[in-house]
Amino acid sequence: MSKASWSSRGRWGELARIRILGVGIDPVTMADALTRIEGLLEGGPPGQVITANPEMVMLAGQNESFAQVFREAALVVPDGYGLIWASRVLGCPLPERVAGIDLLENLAALAASRGYRLFLLGAREGVAAGAAANLQARHPGLIICGAHHGYFSPDEERQVLDRIREARPHILAVALGAPRQELWLAGHQAELGVPVGIGVGGSFDVLAGKVQRAPRWMQARGLEWLYRLLREPWRYRRMLFIPRFAAAVLREKYTGRREHS
Ligand code: UDP
C-alpha cells in the first residue's frame, strides 16, 4: 500500500499537504499560490515560500534542519515535474507544476499592481541587478528596493542584512541555490521582518538573460533536466538524484517503505 497520504491540516494552509517521501507539498495551482502569498503580504505572519523539486525532497530526507524548514514553511509549491509525477504514482496527484521562475514573474506583476517592494538577493555580481531591470521593463511601476549578489563572505553578511532591513522589502527573493537559500531565509527572515521570503534557485540567471530556459515543449514534457544536462554537462553528477528519486518513489508505492538513498 502506498505511504503517500493527505497529511493533517498544515500550520498555515487551508489545504492539507501531500506527502512525497515524507516531505509535505501544498497541492496548489499557480493561482492558489498567488492567493496564499497575497494573504501573507496583507498582514499574515511572515512566511517562507519553498519552490520544491525532487532533489530538495531527497535532501530533506537526509537533513533534519532542511526537513524542519519545509515543515515550517508557509507554502511549499511543486516546482519540478518530478514531484507531479511522484504525486500521481503515489495516488495523491498535485494539481499542476508551479515553477519558481514563473511564480517570481507573477509576484513581480502582483507587486507592481499593489506597490509591494521586492528585493533580489543572489547570483553573481550584476545578475540580480540585470534581472531587476528586466522585471521592471516588463512590469511598469514595479519597485525593486534592492539587488545584491550572492557571493558575500560570512564577514560581509551583516552588511547585506542591514541593506535588506533598511530597504524594507515586502518580498525577498533569494537565489543562493538549495538548500542554502531556504536555510538562510529560515535563519534571517524574522529578524529582517520581511513578510514573504522565497528561494528561487537559478531564476535570476534566466531573468537576466544569462542562461536560457528550456523550450516550452521540453518544459511541458518534464524534460527541463535534460535540457540543463545538455547545456551544462558537468552537472551530470548532481543529476544522479533523478533515478534515485524515481526508485525511492516506486519503492514507497510498492513496498510502503521509505528510503532516500
Ligand atoms: N549562488 C550564489 N551564491 C553561492 C552559490 C550559488 O548566489 O554561493 C547562485 C548561483 O549564481 C545561481 C543560484 O545561486 O544564480 C542557483 O544556483 P544553482 O543553479 O546551482 O541552483 P539550483 O537552483 O540548481 O539549486
Image (spheres, helix red, strand yellow):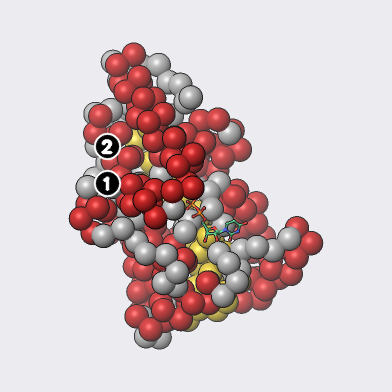
Compute the Cα span from label 2 to label 1. 9 Å
* Residue at image coords 44%, 53%: 232
Task: Name the side, left or right, on which 51 lies relative to 166.
Answer: left
Above or below 124: residue 116: below
Q: Farthest right residue?
A: 155
Numbered label attached to residue 175: none
Residue type for callout 1: Gly
Residue 46 horizontal side relative to residue 91, left or right: right
Which residue: 36% across, 68% down? 105
> Ligand 1 closer than 8 Å to the CB at disc 1?
no
- Whether residue 162 can be seen here: yes
Q: Please name the residue that numbered disc 2 is placed on.
A: 85
Percent across and percent down for residue 95 are 24, 45
Q: Residues within 10 Å of mark 2 (few under 14, many from 20)?
A: some
Q: Residues within 10 Å of mark 1 (few under 14, many from 20)?
A: some
- Across and down, in percent, residue 27 comes to 31, 44
- The residue to which callout 1 is attached is 222
Q: Nearer the viewer, residue 8 or 50?
A: 50
Q: Position of residue 217 (x, y in %)?
A: 20, 55
Q: Earlier in the sequence, mark 2 or mark 1?
A: 2
Q: Does the image show residue 34? A: no
